[in-house]
Amino acid sequence: MRIARTCRAMGIRSIAVYSDADAQAMHVRECDEAMHIGPAPARDSYLDAGKIIAAARTARADAVHPGYGFLSENADFARACRDAGLIFIGPPAAAMEAVGDKIAAKQAAEAAGVPTVPGYMGSDRSTETFAREAARIGVPVLVKAAAGGGGKGMRLVNDLAEFENALESAQREARSAFGDGTVFLEKYLHSPRHIEVQILGDARGNYIHLNERDCSIQRRHQKIVLETSSPAVTTELRKELGDAALRIAAGVGYENAGTVEFMLDSAGAFYFLEVNARLQVEHPVTEETTGVDLVREQILVASGEPLSLRQSDVSPRGHAIEVRIYAEDPSAGLLPSSGRLLDVELPSGPGIRIDAGVETGSVVTTDYDPMLAKLIASGRTRDEALGRLSAALDECHVAGVATNVEFLRRVVAEPDFRAGKATTDFLEVHHLAGAAPPADRTAVLAAAGALQELDGWRSKVQPRSVTFVGVQHPIEVSYDWKDSGWRASDADGAMIVSALEEPSRFDARDGKSSTSLSAWRTHDGIELALGSPAQRRVFVLDRLEDVAHAGSHAGGSGGSGQATAPMSGTVVKIASEMGANVKAREVLAVIEAMKMEHAITAPFDGRVVSVNAKPGDRVEAGAVLVEIEPAS
């Protein structure tokens, strides 16, 4: 979507590619043309270079822009595009090989005199050698994919007893995400800042940097809050970082856009981390503070034009902050969520920019990364940008899947973040993820009343009883003809819930006050947006019964010894077999969803009594993969 907008402004036709899973995606409709390239699994579509090049030829395209995922840092793909007579909008294959692989990039940085983080990048990649080197480096140690980025194929090891599982998982995830399972080891630095420098280079040997971005707030090693300028970077340090980045770029003959990443310790010393040989997800904050359209510059450089800017033309202009809105559930450890988006309301206003890939009605699948949109706020000062960001998050609502919007509100409101003190362990220190506040009585009654209207319950003469999971008492609901609404009652009183003309909007009143809310029917209950700022509430329906015919209800329990899939996905490993004895927290199974692996572990010491899946199986959320019985 982002690339297509700049193409349109430059008078260039854009051609999308899409898999089966994305046939109805927003980018397919918004581009001038779209080409189908295969089934949902990335290896059979977005990671298949031959299919993409064939589509480009069929569409008579001039150039390929790889975006910032999948094959965007794959030198073989860049070379194949050029061999096919296509312009690859990115660095040449040789430069990409020199820096796109993180191992080669570290070697290039050392050659340019830039300090690097200690680790192991040797050619002997046997499990035994990796284990020995991990012991030498000492914990905590990172296992990192040599190709790609975005936190995929990365594992933090704090206990060497867990190293081999972490190594195997990182290699498997890297192969799935990037088509390359090569990994290396790196010493994990305590509480650094993550600082990156945006660079641009042309084929004539001209290079500039467009200042730094602070990417310190991360979850699962993936950035979620980003800003420029960094609160920790002085004018002098900015020049040192920029000079180091450009030395690395010049040393490998880099062209086009890229990002050089550093770790900054508390003493102000910096260490080279990696080069992202592509456009970064967080590029909008740089655009907002420099006035440079980075995609336009990419296209011009790839067309053979010289850089349109000199270093003296670049200076910080105000402040910008980006947050990434993900389909993931903070109450479940930020696990990805999937489903149809029932309603999407994104903010606007002075200093607010939205880069979104979804809209109301879009389907979020488990096949790809769960990012939905980017919200960027800018202002003359950091405080002004923060104020606009906070207000915009209050106006942001996505219904149908769990999202991290409320979690982002907590991050932005945290005093240490507002004071500019964030480091890469920010989320571990502040524990901001977790369950939403318990639902109050107003929300429960409103949910029961709105549910009847959304279900189109026609028997307005017959009362109903609604029971939600986790709510102790059922709610009695009947239609109130006098007040033209559903009367939802509990032991403490009643509330009238009336539908408004606007879809999914309701008014709830109890005689003392009136509350506006939005509500959507989900496959297993109802979702509300209630209050200001809107708090998302999801109620799972346990029973919905005609009161006159209510019968007995037998509840079932999944059993504490069941290892279930936390989401829909593909089983990649079953680590136990029938009759095996397992320890608490031992991995029983691994599933892959949304380009990430998720391990399901034993809740206690026990014995495996049932294995219900095998590698390659597609499973739904809640599916029982392995069952164990207590050791006693």
Image (cartoon, rainbow, N blue to C red):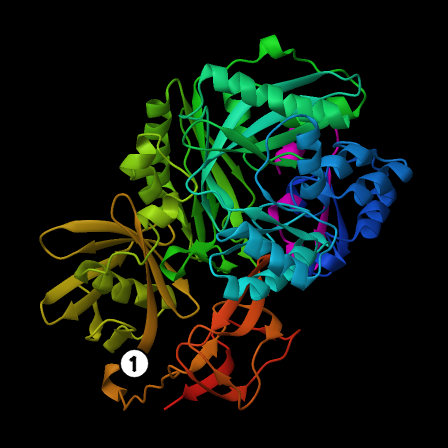
In this rendering, would 406 be left or right of 175?
left
Residue 418 lies in quadrant: top left
- Of residue 504 and residue 289, the one placed in the foreground of this image is 289
Q: Is residue 277 magenta?
A: no
Determine if residue 317 is in view.
no
Quadrant assignment for the C terminus: bottom left
Residue 573 lies in quadrant: bottom right
Residue 180 against residue 109 in the figure, above or below: below
- Of residue 284 and residue 130, the one placed in the foreground of this image is 130
At horizontal 75% and vertical 36% (from top left) the residue drawn is 98
Residue 506: x and y in percent read: 29, 54
Residue range (magenta): 1-27
At horizontal 87% and vertical 43% (from top left) the residue drawn is 57
Residue 582 against residue 1 in the figure, above or below: below
**Residue of label 1:** 545
Q: Disc 1 marks which amino acid?
A: Glu
Residue 360: x and y in percent read: 49, 50
Residue 603: x and y in percent read: 40, 76
Quadrant assignment for the N terminus: top right
Residue at the front extreme, as displayed: 136
Q: Is residue 7 magenta?
A: yes
In this rendering, would 84 be left or right of 352?
right
Residue 259 against residue 569 in the figure, above or below: above
At horizontal 27% and vertical 91% (from top left) the residue drawn is 552
Residue at the top extreme, as displayed: 312
At horizontal 61% and vertical 60% (from top left) the residue drawn is 131
